[in-house]
Image (spheres, grey):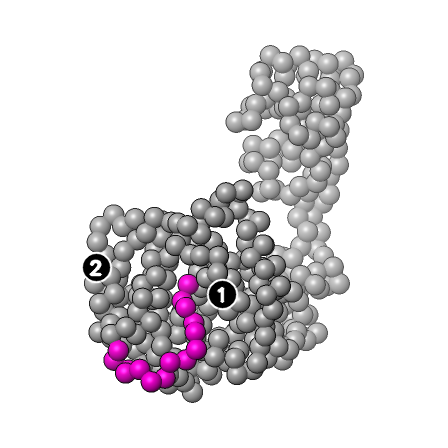
C-alpha cells in the first residue's frame, strides 16, 4: 500500500484527538461550547482544547505567545480539524467500513514502535485512553479508504511522464561511485600498530579482523560492503576513496577507536537506464499526484460545505503546553 501523503492532513493524522460522533445539527451556531460547525456537525470546544494540548505537548513555552502567535496556532489546528471532519463525513456518505480487526492491527503497529512500557506511558501522558486511540485509528483508516477507493483509482503515471522525468533528472538518478572496504577497529593506537605490522608481514586482513576487531562486522572479516560517499563518517570516506584496490590504510583515529581500512573493490559511477529506475520514478510521481489529488478533493469538499467558525469561542481557548504526547499513529 502506498503511503498516504501527509499534506494537507498531517496535523490531523498525527494526533487524531477530536471526538467525532454523530452530527449535532440542532445546536445554536454561536454555542459557546462549539468552535465551529461543519455542515451542521459541531467541532466542540472541549475536544478542540484537548487536541490543542496534544499538539503543544512537550513544548514548554519560554515566554507567553503573542496574541498573533496564539491565534495562528489555534486557527491552523481548527483548519486541520475542519478538513478531517469533511473527510469523515464523505467517508460516511460513501459507506466506508472499517473492521475492529483492522483497527487492532494498526494499533499493534503503533504499539510496536515503543519499548515495553513506553506505549502505556505515552497514552497516559497524552491523556488518551485505549478506547479513544482505537476510535481515532478507525477514523484514520476510514479516511485512508476514502482516498484509496474514491480518489487514487483515477491517478496514473503515463509513459511520457516517466520518460520526461527521467530525461530531466538523469544526473540525480545516476549511480554514484562506490567502494567496498573492510576495517579493523581497536581501542588503542599501540594495538592498531601491532596489527598493522602483522599485515605488513603478510597476515590476511580478514583473519586479523575476525580475531581483533571490536566492530560488529568482525565476524565477516570486517567487510563493510559497498558504499557511496556520504553514507559513512566523513573520515572513512576520505580514506576509503583515496585508496587503490588492495591497498591498506595507515592507522586512522575516530570517535569509535583506531582503524585500519582495506579497499577490496571499486565501482565507477554510471548513468542508470530508464528500466533500472522506472519503479523509483513511478513511485515518486504517484506520491506527488496523490498529494495534489488529496488537496483538490478537499478543496471540492470545502467549496460546497457550510462552515461556520465561532470566533468568540475560538479566541477564548487558551494556548498552553502539556507534559506529554499521545502515541503517534503510523502511516499505512
Bin the neighbour count of mark 1 within 10 Å (Cα to Cα): few under 14, some 14-19, many 20 and up: some
Q: Nearer the viewer, residue 101 or 137?
A: 101
Instruction: Please tell me which of labels 2 and 1 falls first in the chain.
Output: 2
Q: Number of marks in the image?
A: 2
Asked if residue 126 lies in the magenta stretch, the reply is no
Q: Which residues are magenta?
A: 17-31
Residue occupying the point 53% across, 42% down: 115
Helix, strand or loop at disc 1?
Answer: helix
Q: Which mark is residue 66?
A: 2
Which secondary structure class fits the magenta region best? Answer: loop
Residue occupying the point 39% across, 74% down: 82
Quarter occupied by residue 71: bottom left
Quadrant (top left, top right, bottom left, bottom right) of the N terminus: bottom right
Residue occupying the point 37% across, 58% down: 55
- Classify 46 as above or below 93: above
Helix, strand or loop at disc 2?
Answer: loop
Place of residue 266 in the rendered image (x, y in percent of width and height, measured from the top left): 73, 39
Place of residue 308 in the rendered image (x, y in percent of width and height, measured from the top left): 31, 81
- Classify 45 as above or below 234: below
Place of residue 99 in the rendered image (x, y in percent of width and height, measured from the top left): 60, 69
Place of residue 79 in the rendered image (x, y in percent of width and height, measured from the top left): 37, 72
Quarter occupied by residue 262: top right
What is the spatial separation of the Cα atoms under label 2 and label 1, in whole angstroms? 34 Å
Quarter occupied by residue 84: bottom left
Residue that badge 1 annotates = 135
Quadrant (top left, top right, bottom left, bottom right) of the C terminus: bottom right
Q: Nearer the viewer, residue 38 or 168?
A: 38
Amino acid at each position: 500500500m502506498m503511503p498516504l501523503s501527509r499534506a494537507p492532513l498531517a496535523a490531523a493524522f498525527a494526533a487524531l484527538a477530536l471526538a467525532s460522533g454523530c452530527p449535532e445539527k440542532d445546536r445554536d451556531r454561536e454555542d459557546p461550547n462549539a468552535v465551529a460547525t461543519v455542515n451542521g456537525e459541531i467541532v466542540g470546544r472541549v475536544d478542540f482544547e484537548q487536541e490543542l494540548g496534544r499538539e503543544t505537548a512537550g513544548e514548554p513555552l519560554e515566554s507567553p505567545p503573542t496574541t498573533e502567535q496564539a491565534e495562528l496556532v489555534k486557527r491552523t489546528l481548527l483548519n486541520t480539524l475542519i478538513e478531517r471532519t469533511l473527510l469523515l463525513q464523505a467517508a460516511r456518505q460513501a459507506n466506508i467500513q472499517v473492521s475492529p480487526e483492522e483497527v487492532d492491527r494498526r494499533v499493534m503497529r503503533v504499539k510496536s514502535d515503543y519499548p515495553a512500557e513506553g506505549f502505556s506511558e505515552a497514552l497516559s501522558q497524552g491523556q488518551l485512553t485505549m478506547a479513544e486511540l482505537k476510535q481515532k485509528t478507525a477514523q484514520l483508516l476510514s479516511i485512508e479508504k476514502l482516498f484509496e477507493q474514491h480518489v487514487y483509482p483515477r491517478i496514473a503515471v503515463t509513459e511520457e511522464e516517466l520518460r520526461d522525468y527521467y530525461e530531466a533528472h538523469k544526473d540525480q538518478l545516476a549511480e554514484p561511485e562506490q567502494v567496498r572496504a573492510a576495517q579493523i577497529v581497536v581501542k588503542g593506537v599501540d594495538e592498531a600498530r601491532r596489527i598493522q605490522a602483522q599485515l605488513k608481514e603478510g597476515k590476511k586482513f580478514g583473519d586479523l579482523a575476525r580475531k581483533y576487531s571490536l566492530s560488529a562486522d568482525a565476524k565477516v572479516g570486517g567487510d563493510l560492503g559497498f558504499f557511496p560517499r556520504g553514507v559513512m563518517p566523513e573520515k572513512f570516506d576520505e580514506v576509503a576513496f583515496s585508496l587503490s584496490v588492495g591497498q591498506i590504510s595507515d592507522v586512522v583515529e575516530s570517535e569509535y577507536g583506531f582503524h585500519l581500512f582495506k579497499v577490496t573493490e571499486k565501482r565507477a559511477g554510471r548513468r542508470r537506464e530508464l528500466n533500472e529506475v522506472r519503479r523509483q520514478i513511478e513511485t515518486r510521481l504517484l506520491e506527488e499526484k496523490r498529494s495534489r489529488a488529496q488537496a483538490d478533493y478537499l478543496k471540492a469538499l470545502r467549496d460546497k460545505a457550510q462552515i461556520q467558525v465561532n470566533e468568540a469561542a475560538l479566541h477564548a481557548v487558551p494556548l498552553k503546553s502539556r507534559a506529554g504526547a499521545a502515541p503517534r499513529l503510523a502511516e499505512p
